[in-house]
Image: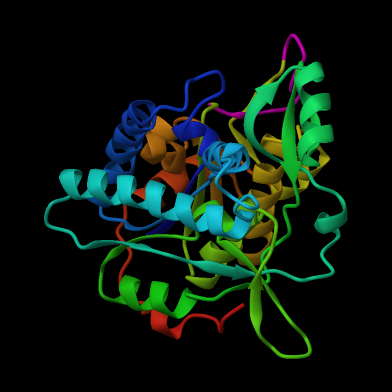
Amino acid sequence: MRIVAALGGNALLRRGERPDADTQLRHVHEAGLSLAELVLAGHELVVTHGNGPQVGLLALESAADADLTAPYPLDLLGAETQGLIGSLLVRELRDRLPDREIAALVTHTEVAPDDPAFARPSKFIGRPYTPQQAEQLAAERGWTLARDGDARRRVVPSPAPARILELPFVRTLLAAGDIVVCAGGGGIPLLRDPATNLLRGAEAVVDKDLTAALLAELVEADALLILTDVTHVYRRFGHGDPGPLTRTTPAELRTLDLPQGSMGPKARAAASFVERTGRLAGIGPLDDALGVLLGTTGTLVCPGDPAPGAHERAAEAGARPRTGRSPVEAAPDA
């Protein structure tokens, strides 16, 4: 099978942890072990990742740098996080899979200038603040901050991806049998000037989950795995008996009241991929990617009614390597 595995930014730097390099190295080590299991089971692999904590850290450092006339824009900070996280993932995967070629590809994502997300910032980046700190930051730096649990965090626009510019190169690398790390943080956000057709950076962080779903569709992936720091999607998140989902459908996922700053976008992306392709998606823990694919952990999203036997069919498919289809013949660029 061809798998697109999307790692949540919070899975590499978790809530409450100090944003030290050693902390992220430890979590990337865990991710490398988990992802390598997919390859050793005979599957093709494309890896993408979030960058919310990392881009927030860089934005905070840039805003506090007295030597700068203005802070660095989010598109350039997004490019920096792609290099940082991509390098860590490539190093770790090379250690686990020394006989495989692995490449991290700097990836740009075109977004629509009229995307409503630009008027409604919703993507959390960076560390939490107290309400008093948030009020001060909003006044001093012009940031928009929103409630995240009991704290406040900066929010920025998170537009949907319209086109992944480096998609042909991803396909070429896959056709050569390589493992690809790409579209980190949803891709570096770009806007196209309708008058000149020239590209410029956008002050945004692309919806990484929707980018993962689009990427999975366009490389004809057999499964999309969204790997994060929780074990399941829950029916009644935040209640005493939340009810973990082990199997579900896109229709059921879309009825759930899930947090928009965390699980909501993941559920929408999984539902969209399954609806558009009729293939499988899974949402589950970063440290057991193969288990999410086989349905032994996490939430498996199946097309239609997850009738008895769907779990077993997914497990059977998960054990069978993909053969005989060239990604170069996939759908045209988005």
Q: Can residue 38 be seen in this view?
A: no
The quadrant of the picture occupied by the C terminus is bottom right
Task: Judge from the rendering whether residue 256 lies leftward or rightward of residue 307; answer left or right.
Answer: right
Q: Give whichever of 223, 104 is nearer the camera.
A: 104
Q: Give whichever of 332, 157 is nearer the camera.
A: 157
The image shows residue 126, relative to residue 43, as above or below, that is above
Q: Is residue 104 visible?
A: yes
Within the image, what quadrant is residue 182 found in?
bottom left
Task: Judge from the rendering whether residue 156 lies leftward or rightward of residue 281; answer left or right.
Answer: right
Within the image, what quadrant is residue 137 found in?
top right
The quadrant of the picture occupied by the N terminus is bottom left
Q: Where is residue 48 in the image (x, y as percent from the top left)?
A: 46, 53
| x 46%, y 53%: residue | 80
Task: Judge from the rendering whether residue 21 lies leftward or rightward of residue 49; answer left or right.
Answer: left
Q: Where is residue 307 in the image (x, y as percent from the top left)?
A: 63, 42
User: How does the figure colour the protein chain or chains?
Assistant: rainbow
The image shows residue 90, relative to residue 24, as above or below, that is below
Q: Position of residue 125 (x, y in %)?
A: 64, 38
Q: Give whichever of 252, 63 is nearer the camera.
A: 63
Q: What stretch is highlighted in magenta?
A: 231-241
The image shows residue 195, relative to residue 226, as above or below, that is below
Q: Is the magenta stretch mostly helix, strand or loop?
A: loop
| x 71%, y 61%: residue | 160
Task: Judge from the rendering whether residue 166 lies leftward or rightward of residue 148; answer left or right.
Answer: left
Q: Give whichever of 211, 305 is nearer the camera.
A: 211
| x 18%, y 43%: residue | 96
Q: From this viewpoint, which residue is outermost toward the left? A: 99
Report how many numbered discs are placed on residues in the image: 0
Q: Position of residue 131 (x, y in %)?
A: 81, 18
Q: Does the magenta stretch include residue 41?
A: no
The image shows residue 234, relative to residue 304, as above or below, that is above
